[in-house]
Amino acid sequence: MLLTITYTGKDTQHLGYLLYKNPHRPQAFDLTHGKAYVFYTEISDERTTAALLLDINPIDLARGKQSGLFDYVNDRPYAASSFMSTAISKVFGTALSGRADDFQALSDSPINLTASITMLPCRDTDKLPKIFEPLKYSLSYETFLADENFSDWGISKYVNLTISGKVRLCDLLKHLYVLIPVFDRQKHYWVGEEEIEKLLRHGENWLTEHPEKEYIAAQYLNRQRRLVNIAIERLTGEITEKPPKTLNSERLEKIVSTLKEFGARKVIDLGCGEGNLLKLLVKDRHFTHVTGVDVSDAALQRARKDYSLAESEIELFQGSLVYKDARFSGYDAACVIEVVEHLDISRISTFERVLFKFANPPLIIITTPNKEYNTHYEKLGNNLRHTDHRFEWTRAEFVEWAERTAESFGYVVKILEVGEADEIHGAPTQMGVFSCKE
């Protein structure tokens, strides 16, 4: 798939400074499922064109999945898909942010730009002017027969699209970042609440007033009505205050702040699930090495599909908390978040040795439900918060276990509460912060 950006006017070779890509040196970048290449097809004072070429490997896409022929025979290697947005963010990230250092004045100015996108999936070409013309672009597109040898198959669902306008480069890149996935129905990443933040961040200053904002939001968010409703409410300003924090978000924020308090930079999340904690850690420059481990391969696969994790330097691997594993060692901190209660009580002593004796990180953070707080939840069938929980500790039981374990393995422990507490039953989550004795 190919995207070209052409700057016409005066001193157009400065496009290289705006994109932070040398016009005289082709460059290659590794992507999760292939490579991206940047090169210039024409360079002059009056007209300069930069090209972003993606080489997506369909076999890489199918690896690790129980899949059929469709995963190997698909349009991903040539269609302008969500992979292009990922590449724009990775390859042109500085330009996307609007920063240009010595050429900041030019970056902040509208200039004559033309973008051409090959093989954009578009089943309804009537949507093209409705999407791009409100952004002050002129556009043209080229259609094709689905197969020249079988004219009765009709017109292909792909078009070659060209848009032109006098616009800041960062705005053009933001428009492309958001709108290419709008036309692509097969997102290569997991679409969750984090995609709302990306949509709003890159849609800032233009999406709110766009007449097709609801369509754009719906397509970008893969037609997930709950996510779309949240995005539209925030776009239209109907929600003036941030919604209250969920217990999970409060718990994760507390963990991140504790890791920073102890100066931990290399962190392993044991029992990471789909990567909720990992997403916070990889966005924070304080953390230099982030690893996720889970016994469930399906959970790891979902984590790998998440956009924010797929394009990061994160390490993910399958492992169990009840088996000694050399890969658990060498970290400043280990986090075990809402996991221990999923173990059989007979395996807790093994878990203790694996984590505290063999992995032996300087800092360990463990969170688990407070069983006493369960009176706040109606209809708990077995009096536990989840059907897969093997047990849950009261506050006294957790303190007894934590202090005994800390003493046995040379740690000291501090017990914290997370969530809104009541005077009788405490908080919903209890958290043990174990640090090695000096």
Image (cartoon, rainbow, N blue to C red):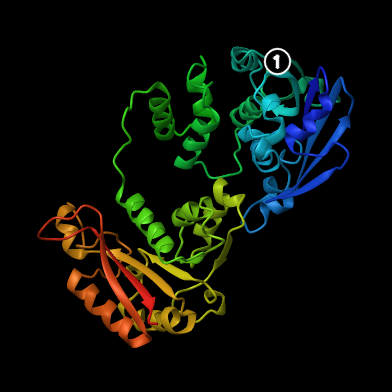
* Above/below status of 277 relative to 146: below
Q: Residue at x 21, y 63 (%)?
A: 382
* Above/below status of 257 relative to 391: above
Q: Residue at x 49, y 52 (%)?
A: 279
Q: Say whether residue 165 is left or right of residue 251.
A: right
Q: Say whether residue 26 is left or right of residue 363.
A: right
Note whether residue 306 is visible: no
In this view, the residue in front, 40 or 368, is 40
* Above/below status of 205 relative to 357: above
Quadrant showing the N terminus: top right
Q: Position of residue 230 (x, y in %)?
A: 39, 31
Which element type, helix, strand or loop, lies under badge 1?
strand
**Residue where numbered disc 1 is placed:** 165
10 Å crowding of disc 1: few (<14), some (14-19), many (20+)? some
As shown in the figure, which amino acid type bears the numbered disc 1?
Gly
Q: Position of residue 290 (x, y in %)?
A: 54, 62
Q: How many numbered marks have been drawn onto this rendered protein structure? A: 1
Query: Which residue reaches farthest front?
Result: 102
Q: Position of residue 284 (x, y in %)?
A: 51, 52
Quadrant showing the C terminus: bottom left
* Above/below status of 374 relative to 7: below
In this view, the residue in front, 27 or 176, is 27
Q: Say whether residue 365 is left or right of residue 318.
A: left
